[in-house]
Image (cartoon, helix red, strand yellow):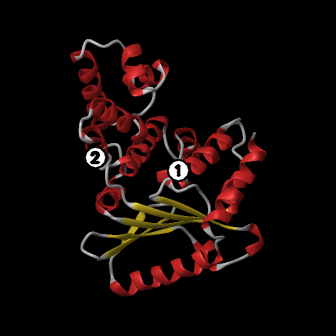
Amino acid sequence: MGAAVDLLVEELIEARTSRAMTQEEWARTVKFSPTHVSSVETRHRPPTGEYVAAVDRAFQTGGAYTRLLVRLASFDSAPIWLRDWIEIEREAILLRWFEPAYVPGLLQTEAYARATLAGGRFTAEEIDRHVASRLARQAILNRDVPPQLIAVIDEAVLRRPAPGHPGLMREQVERIVALAELDHVQVQVVPASTGIYLGLAGQFIVAEMPDDSRVGYADNQLKAQIVDQPGEIVRLVRMWEVVRNYALPLKQSLELIKEVSKIWT
């Protein structure tokens, strides 16, 4: 993990020890396992948005740790080229997110996030930093007033196996189901029967900001591109309408996700 995330872990440890609580007592209070608490405190597992939100609820902090996690996600745990987008993502009130190849980062489990980074492109230390950053970004979904997330994914994303990682896809698809049942998270699926369509050209996100402006984001193998020119935003929004029209309605999408989850059990 990066030094920024280490700072949050130190704050969590201080919060526990200042209350003279053991890890077991802390775990019971925040409703996580003692093993999970220990893994966070020993830096073997990054503090996720769900975990810090549980701490905030248990100790009625007013969301202090969640806000800290979101802010720290833009520091040294994130790639330099991603930090500007993380700040935009943190301020957005609506995120329209299309993914033809992967589960959207805000919906990923730790194991899935790690699997997407494996393969030799990154060192073990870089993978740890990137995973910590990705999981920290998820904290925005646990805020008192979270952004609305509308995600459209290709059905192939749900069916793509992770060789050598038994149980990974089952856990991941179950997480999508759980999040898709939240009021502020919508997940729609472009069914395999659609065949070839324009969205396969690549992933993109359109963020709606509090001042009604829009900012776009597109990722590739080397770096992210932040788009803010009006003409380019219009093109992204048009593409969004195209891919969403291919997608199944919400209820049918959730039924399909649950159906696919059965192949991973």
How many badges with numbers are in the image?
2
Front-most of residues 112 and 24: 24
Q: Residue at x 63, y 70 (%)?
A: 249
For label 1, the residue is 179
219 up-or-down from 169: above or below: below
- In the image: residue 26, left or right of residue 127: left
Provide the secondary structure element on which disc 2 rests.
loop
Q: Residue at x 42, y 65 (%)?
A: 95
Tags 2 and 1 in contact by the CB under 8 Å rule?
A: no
Determine if residue 87 is in view. Answer: yes
2 or 1: mark nearer the eye:
1
- In the image: residue 4, left or right of residue 206: left
For label 2, the residue is 75
| Image quadrant in which the N terminus is located | top left
Instruction: State which quadrant residue 6 falls in.
Output: top left
Q: Position of residue 57 (x, y in %)?
A: 33, 35
